[in-house]
Image: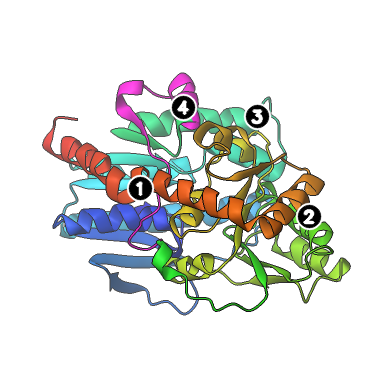
């Protein structure tokens, strides 16, 4: 596993790695290092090699790119060293960035199979993060790089079906591509985690990255409107990212410091307990070209722990979900979101019905059910019948 991410916080990478380890494979994860974490440790059978520190505070294109380039060369060196010691059969590279797949050049030349897993579709991600257009040189260059990267890989995984179609249409061949949304691991996310005693509060929760397209400023403004009619409401945001300073300022300007709380991110198994002890999950994404097509695993995770969720009606969420499973609000509409927060606060019986339907949905859409398809791809690649 090769990923520009913090292993202990990235459920997608952890699930792939642990699933392979359970089959008896020897699995390494070459990842970022968070402050206070060792450079190397073994977690649930996976050897985790942390090779570069990172703060999610990039404000410009150059600082963001420089950190990616540093990781590329460091990961290439570590991957090559480890491959020469004990040759890899397969290298699963997680994008962003797409070009990270070329760090596996030496293993590929040595016969290893390469999987490129596109978590975030890079041209659209870059355009949303830095405000460039589809006609810009940067966007066209990233599309070209996507085509080269998918061509280098033996198999390509897209993070949802909408992105699968986009990648097939412009960069790859359908027969070497699959779509895997970020399914929850029900061994980690389950309704048995809830243990909160009645305290008169109504906790709204958001766990995840704090970027502009996630729309947390919309959630804070909606909360301002809603909590005036529901004084027991609190909004708890767990995460980090470039939007955090803006959110901190917004909370202060709206005088919500005693109602809206910004917490540091937590490891996956700890955040699962936090989510299970909320009363409502919120996923307030903007419906732009990237955010509108980026699948949020937080939705299924809230469903798995038995917590109702309110979600922006983006293209991707309208594709996978319906109003028998969750409450939709119109994207970018803080007043509509406030109304849906109040509906959840006042309509506990409807929330229970949504939760029951959502739990049934998760029974068919979780990592335990879907991991066999991924393991089949790996077996096919390694044994030559993919």
Q: Where does label 4 land, which residue? A: 167
Q: Residue furthest front?
A: 349
Q: Which residues are magenta?
A: 162-189
On the image, the x and y values in percent for residue 218 come to 76, 52
Cα–Cα span, label 4 and label 2: 35 Å
Q: Residue at x 56, y 35 (%)?
A: 316
On the image, the x and y values in percent for residue 214 come to 65, 50
Q: Residue at x 42, y 30 (%)?
A: 148
Q: Are marks 3 and 4 in contact (CB under 8 Å)?
A: no
Q: Where does label 2 land, which residue? A: 222
Q: Residue at x 57, y 30 (%)?
A: 141
- Badge 1 marks a residue whose secondary structure is helix
Q: Where does label 1 land, which residue? A: 363
In the rendered view, would you say 351 is above or below 290? below
Q: Nearer the viewer, mark 1 or mark 3?
A: 1
Cα–Cα span, label 3 and label 2: 37 Å
Q: Are marks 4 and 1 in contact (CB under 8 Å)?
A: no
- Badge 3 marks a residue whose secondary structure is helix
Q: Earlier in the sequence, mark 4 or mark 1?
A: 4
Residue 55 appears left or right of 222: left
Residue 195 appears left or right of 377: right
């Amino acid at each position: 596993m090769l990923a520009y991410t913090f292993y202990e916080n990235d459920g997608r990478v952890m699930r792939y790695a642990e699933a392979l380890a359970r089959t008896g494979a020897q699995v390494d994860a070459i990842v970022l290092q968070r402050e206070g974490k060792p450079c190397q440790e073994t977690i649930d059978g996976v050897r985790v090699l942390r090779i570069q520190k990172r703060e999610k505070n990039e404000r410009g294109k150059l600082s963001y790119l420089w950190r990616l380039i540093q990781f590329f060369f460091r990961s290439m060196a570590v991957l090559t060293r480890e491959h020469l010691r004990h040759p890899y059969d397969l290298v699963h590279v997680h994008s962003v960035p797409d070009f990270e797949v070329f760090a596996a050049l030496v293993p590929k030349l040595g016969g290893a199979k390469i999987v490129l897993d596109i978590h975030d579709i890079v041209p659209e991600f870059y355009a949303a993060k830095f405000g460039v257009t589809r006609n810009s040189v940067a966007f066209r260059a990233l599309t070209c790089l996507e085509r080269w990267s998918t061509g280098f890989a033996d198999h390509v995984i897209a993070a949802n079906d909408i992105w699968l179609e986009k990648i097939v249409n412009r960069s790859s061949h359908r027969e070497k591509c699959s779509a895997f949304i970020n399914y929850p691991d029900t061994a980690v996310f389950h309704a048995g985690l809830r243990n909160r005693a009645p305290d008169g509060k109504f906790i709204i929760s958001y766990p995840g990255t704090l970027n502009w397209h996630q729309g947390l400023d919309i959630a804070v403004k909606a909360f301002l409107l809603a909590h005036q009619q529901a004084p027991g409401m609190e909004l708890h945001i767990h995460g980090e990212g470039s939007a955090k300073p803006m959110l901190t300022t917004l909370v202060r300007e709206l005088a919500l410091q005693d109602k809206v709380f910004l917490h540091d991110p937590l490891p996956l198994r700890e955040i699962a307990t936090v989510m299970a002890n909320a009363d409502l999950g919120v996923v307030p994404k903007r419906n732009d070209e990237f955010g509108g097509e980026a699948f949020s695993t937080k939705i299924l995770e809230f469903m798995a722990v038995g917590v109702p969720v309110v979600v922006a009606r983006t293209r991707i969420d309208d594709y996978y979900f319906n109003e028998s499973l969750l409450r939709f609000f119109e994207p970018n509409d803080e007043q509509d979101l406030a109304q849906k927060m109040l509906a959840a606060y006042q309509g506990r019986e409807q929330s229970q019905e949504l939760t029951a339907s959502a739990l049934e949905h998760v029974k068919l859409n979780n990592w335990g059910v879907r991991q066999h398809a991924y393991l089949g791809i790996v077996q096919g690649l390694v044994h030559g019948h993919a």
